[in-house]
Amino acid sequence: MSVIHRSWSYYQKSFTGFSTEIWWLSLVTLINRAGAMVIPFLSLYLTSDRGFSLEDVGWVMTSFGAGSIAGAWIGGQLSDRVGFYKIMVWSLVSSGVLLVLLSFIESYWGIIAGVFFFMLTSDAFRPAVYVAITAYSKPGNRTRAVTLIRLAINLGFSVGPALGGLIISTIGYNLLFWVDGITCVIAGLLITMLLNPKSQPVKAVKEETTKQLAPYKDYDYLIFLTALFVFATMFFQYFSLMPVFYKQDRGLTEGEIGLLMALSGLLIFIFEMPLIYALDHRERFSRFMILFFSAVLLGFGFLIVNFSGWGGYLVIGLILATIAEMLCFPFANTVAMERGSRGSTGMYMAYFQIAFSMAHLVGHNLGMQLSDNYGYAVVMYLFTGGALLSGLLFWLVKGKLL
């Protein structure tokens, strides 16, 4: 058997064992994310099209994070009370409508409010989909189920920014809101067509919500979430600060930035599933060792862009950050979902998502404000240190959340 044939066989094997519902969730997610164009270009839209300063953009992105926190909390609460199915449909349809409405808003405070309510409805989806993954997957393939959903997200994300950059350069920013909003609504309608609420495995969810240990009393879990918050704060710079850095400091066009961001999604599409399949359930690769290593890679990704003005360092830095993302987020998701079996799954996943939302709330504004006051070079060194700090925090709870 040739090396190529064995590699292809291994790649195919990494995609086996999933329920039909997980595949449908992945398809819906792929369609939704393929139309996701507003968020990757939001900071550029505000600076280039609306003429906002970096400080103004920072506060808009703060409202982005605040809406994400509110959405995660509401999504977690309602997923436990009314079920994940209804929340997923409501979130996708309502966020799509709000995106279209956001394209008509002109004022600074109106945009802040619009972004907040869009994120509130949009991020209510995340705890719900995590509960759905828990219900529709087996414990033995849960990490890979998360990875499959992430694969759909990143495959769509490899299309969205590239197409978005093309639309901006040929038509303008306004069409982005319409395309993104329409695909959100389509994704919500597809859930009603492909996933029958009467066939939901509700029993699986109820069994995991019988033990009522509150997440805020689970101190080891809170340390883990703190580490995740610091990691995500650093990583999310690639969605706000880094596109502006690429354009203002390194002279890249919107089209080039879109292609660079699409590279990350393409790498994840090709390598993440076999990578997770190789690492999952291997005793010599503990989850927290992997999380620690991912933080180190992210730190070096920021450090390397300061080496020189050569564009290749931007690509290398992005690749390191992408590998860090592939290692951190699937295993962190699994840690949270399995910890959720100690209490309310919806609320455990809500706290998990709130850690990401807090990173949005703090990270985007922090990156903009620090860059505006101290320059990009200093910020890259600071974010290198922040990534390494998250690695130390992951190591601190090693062995306590297994």
Image (cartoon, rainbow, N blue to C red):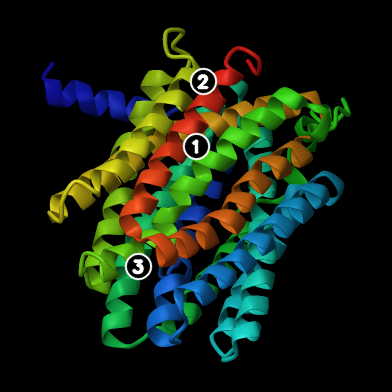
- Asked if residue 23 can be seen in this view, the reply is no
Q: Is residue 2 left or right of residue 134?
A: left
Q: Position of residue 232 (x, y in %)?
A: 51, 44
Figure quadrant of residue 107: bottom right
Per the image, the residue denoted by label 2 is 288
- Which residue is labeled 1 in the image? 329
Q: CA distance from mark 1 to mark 2?
A: 12 Å
Q: Quadrant of residue 96?
A: bottom right
Considering only order in the chain, which callout, 3 or 1, is on the residue closer to the N terminus? Answer: 3
Nearer the camera: disc 1 or disc 2:
2
- Taking 262 as reference, is 81 left or right? right
- Separation (CA) of disc 1 from disc 3: 25 Å
Residue situated furthest top in the rendering: 283
Q: Amino acid at mark 2?
A: Phe
Q: Quadrant of residue 388?
A: top left
The residue that label 3 is drawn on is: 244
Which residue shows up at 24% across the image and 62% down it?
259
Tell me where residue 317 appears, x and y as whole percent.
26, 45
